[in-house]
Amino acid sequence: MKNAKAKLSEKKIESKPNGKAKIVKMTYLGKEREVELYSKFDFTGFDKETILKWYKLNQLGRRLDEKAALYLKMAKGWSYHAPFGGHDGIQLALGLVFRAGKDFLFPYYRDMLTCLAAGITPYEIILNGLSKDADVAGGGRHMSNHFAKPEIRIQNVSSCTGNHAQHAAGLGRAIRRYNGDEIVFCSTGESATAEGYYFEAVNCASTEKLPVVFVIQNNKYGISVPLHEVMGNLNVAENFSGLKNLKIINCDGRDPFDSYRALQSAIEWVESGNGPAIVHAECDRIGSHSNSDNHELYRTPEELQTVARRDPLLQFRYYILSRGIATEEELQEIESENQRIIFEAADQAEKMPNADGSQWNKFIIPEPYIPKDAKTEEYEPDPDAPLISLREAINQTLIEEFQRNPNTFLWGQDIGKGGVFNVVKGMPQMFGKERVFNAPIAEDNIVGTANGFCRYRDDIRVVIEGAEFADYFWPAMEQLVECSHDYWRTKGQFTPNIVIRLASGGYIQGGLYHSQNIEGALVTLPGIRIVAPAFADDAVGLMRNAIRSRGVTMYLEPKFLYNFKNAYAKKPHPEFVVPFGKAKIRRAGTDVTVVAYGTAVHLALFAAKDLEAEGIDVEVIDLRSLIPWDEELVYESIRKTNRVVIAHEDKVTGGFGGEIAGKIAENVFNYLDAPILRVGSKDCPVGFAKEYENAILPNKEDVKEAILKVIKF
């Protein structure tokens, strides 16, 4: 019955008034239970074998849920457990419509039954709950009850509620670009729809008519917060009713048959190419939100009794018996078999090794395209090669890499016109809107859809303009954090292959939101690379390495240098690549070392030239790469000069210079003859008026003053 098509009764489920529902009694697992016959459980079109198979899965899931709670009480694991009881119908149906190994499923932390029905075994579920090294989701690196199996395309999602909706939309975009016939299923609770990024994802899928089915499991509580206190529509799907191309379908999430028919209707809509669908499933939350929550503090005894009586599993069992589908003995046989399955799975899983904490440093970031000992940087440019600006260098390298790999894509704001600084000029016309196209002014969506797009094929590379100016990137930090630990938490099973371009810094009289530097915040995220070229040739080599490498690279473009004459260089050899973490000595010297990157490299070179007349020999090191950075070259220089100044355009407080200074003090303190000095912006936003910009941003004189101070110490 997995592919059966059935007509859906699109209805809104309303709670029945107390005292009017039919309540019957039934014995289950040796205990008499009261059952409210709330759902219809229409078996029409389903044979006995299918009905009993579904019941077996449903009951197996609930016993696993109970096993999880038992492990918690015994302090043996499952330290985070979000029970799914009351969501049974929609979760069972969702797992059954998912085609393992073909479609893509983004479950959320309450989706145990979904994942069981979709293809994760009881043994694998227990491995996850006990944080065992063999856990197929990520070897215990992620929270328990976060089930995944990338091998069959069940995705490893974040604890950040609903943020995987962005990835679902991005994956749908990739399916559409490659003319695939897969479907993306994105499952969340109702409270996730309050997040702005969830709306961005649904809007994106609707605008582009993407093959995504958004499933909302609405139990009317966000942990302890009743839905009516935070949402005008208790049917949260109605919040999206104005979106064109979006089909909204309501169902009873307690009832697997109504849910199945709803999902089949959604699939039919998506497969027609009309757009995405939302399946809104009304559910009950029988238990607390999780083991760390006590719902008795905010739910009345009457409400708890009502949801317990409406238990979907008990309703399912009653209807099977009352309609003569199976006998009590047949159901007890199924239930006994499920108990045996769980006992065997538990015995096997408990013997497996725990997660290996000594492997913490594995899978933080993928190996780059160019190994550290590669010689590609030594390629000499053609003697007749033209001088190019830093802006032209980025543009030409992007074009070359797009020609080299047809699975390379680019999107961002104003990309259609070539970007606000013309960095991607000509690319929309050269490669077409299928590969280079505009994105909405929704930075989180730009990054989040890139993450999802990469999941479709390993050879895909996505270059995005994360924001027109680095200062506008902050809404996307949520998705950048997500990207930063995808590789680690999946134990190397997935990494987004993304280059995030950001026009950074000042000296253009841009003022607030157009002149700030943000790398001080970016460097705190393990799992991403950060580069900042100061010359055109390095802009080529770093971009080439970033695109060809797996993983996430933040590519900071000092906007003042785009057309700055001193940043021009000969166009490099076609295979010229700058390895990550390899700095370059821009000027050799013996008296003092200046460590810099980006615009500050040029300030340091100007200062060094002025001080040469005073007999001071300054060595200038251009880091080029911040994460990783070339510690050894810096230490080697300090062992020679015994003095160091660190210069960058970003603020001194919280700037990356503080990290460099700390490492220097830790590793080569004995070689220092003077304090480590830092030069950077004032601890103040960069103002608009030229007078403010001049006063706040560092300049050549600031660097000279710092050099003279360490020389005279």
Image (cartoon, rainbow, N blue to C red):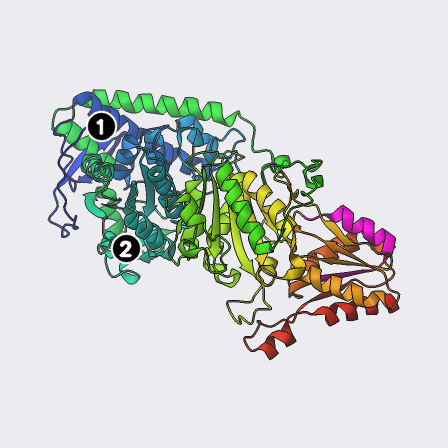
Q: Residue 230: image x %, image y %? A: 31, 61
683 above or below 622?
Answer: below
Residue range highlighted in magenta: 629-647
Q: Nearer the viewer, mark 2 or mark 1?
A: 1
Q: Mark yes or no: residue 496 visible.
A: no
Q: Secondary structure at mark 1?
A: loop
Q: Residue 406: image x %, image y %? A: 45, 37
Q: Which of the numbered marks, if any, corresponds to residue 308?
A: none
Q: Residue 278: image x %, image y %? A: 25, 46
Q: Mark yes or no: residue 301 visible.
A: yes
**Badge 2: residue crowd in 10 Å (few <14, some 14–19, many ≥20):** few
Which quadrant of the view contains residue 317? Answer: top left
Horizontal side of residue 532 vs 38, given as left or right: right
Q: CA distance from mark 2 to mark 1?
A: 41 Å
Q: Are marks 2 and 1 in contact (CB under 8 Å)?
A: no
549 above or below 1?
Answer: below
Which quadrant of the view contains residue 374? Answer: top right
Q: Which of the numbered marks, if any, corresponds to residue 3?
A: 1
Q: Residue at x 61, y 38 (%)?
A: 368
Count the labels in the image.
Answer: 2
- State the quadrant of the N terminus: top left
Q: Amino acid at mark 2?
A: Thr
From the viewer's side, name the closer residue of 352 and 436: 436
Q: Which residue is mark 2?
A: 300
Residue 645 magenta-highlighted: yes
Residue 400 magenta-highlighted: no
**Badge 1: residue crowd in 10 Å (few <14, some 14–19, many ≥20):** few
From the viewer's side, name the closer residue of 682 and 330: 682
Q: Amino acid at mark 1?
A: Asn
Q: Secondary structure at mark 2?
A: loop
708 above or below 207?
Answer: below
Q: Residue at x 23, y 52 (%)?
A: 244
